[in-house]
Each structure stands twice: as C-alpha cells, then as structure tokens.
Image (spheres, rainbow, N blue to C red):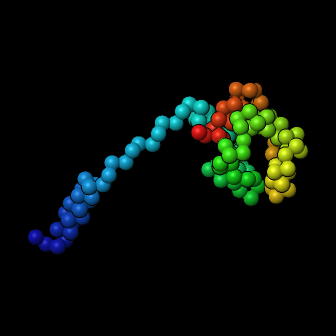
Amino acid sequence: MKVETVAPLLVLLLGFTGLSCSPISEAPAQESETVRQGRRIFLSDACPTCHGQDRMGTNNGPSLQGLRTRWTEENLIRFLREPSAFRQSDPRLQQLADRYKTVMPGPLRSDEARLQTLARYLLPD
C-alpha cells in the first residue's frame, strides 16, 4: 500500500483506539428550572453589562462568583430590591461602590418570586 493510503487509515485507527480507551465522561448535571429562569432574569435585566456574561465581573461591576460566602438568600433579595439603600448600611458595599462608579439600579420588576429566583440563581448550592 502507498503511504498516502495508509496514513489516513492509521489516523482513523488511532482515533478509534483513543476513543475506546478514553474514560466515559459524565453528562453535565441537569439545570433546574430555577437556574434557567434565574439566568433569563439576569440576562433580561441587563446584569451582564456590568457583571459579565459569566458573572466574573467587568470594569463596571464586581464578580458575582462566590456570593454564598457573604450573602443569605434573604439579604440578597433585600439588596436586589433596593441596592442604594442597602449599600449605605454595609461598609463592604460602600467600598465596592467607590471602586465601581456605575450605580447598580434596582430590578426592572421587583415582585418577590422574581427576586427569589434571581437570588437562587446567584447563590448556587
């Protein structure tokens, strides 16, 4: 056989061998409906403009990763309902406000169920 014919067959054979020896990867965990709805709210309220699509922060707003270490669901909902009032009572939030000059707006719609869904999305287990 010619090298031009053998080479593609060898690559194909090695590819199949590699696939058969590779560990079976687990399928990603199913997203809950709350996570899907929370992401929709996050996107529709333009949160990524300041906090980034991946919630890692931008020059306009801090990262939203690891919020569970500093927030309870109840406190985060209170903050989301009225960020400016909450910020005045929390020195850490005042420091963030000094660093990021963009003022965080309140939610577009502040019904309790919507805020709870957003908080649960931002505070994954």
Indicate left or right for 66 with 33 as reference: right
Residue 30 or residue 59, whichever sits in front: 30
Q: With 74 as the anchor, is 27 left or right in this view?
A: left
Residue at image position (81%, 53%) is 96
Residue 120 location (% of width, % of height)? 65, 35
In the image, residue 45 lies at what x, y percent?
72, 39
Work out whether 40 lies above or below 99: above
Q: Residue furthest front?
A: 69
Q: Of 67 and 15, which appears nearest the observer?
A: 67
Residue positioned 76% across, 36% down in the render: 75
Q: Quadrant of the C terminus?
A: top right
Give the percent coordinates (x, y) of residue 33: 56, 30
For residue 107, say whether it is visible: no
In screen coordinates, is 62 left or right of 26? right
Residue at horizontal 79%, vertical 38%? 79
Kindly identify the residue that appears in the image at 25 percent across and 53 percent down. Answer: 20
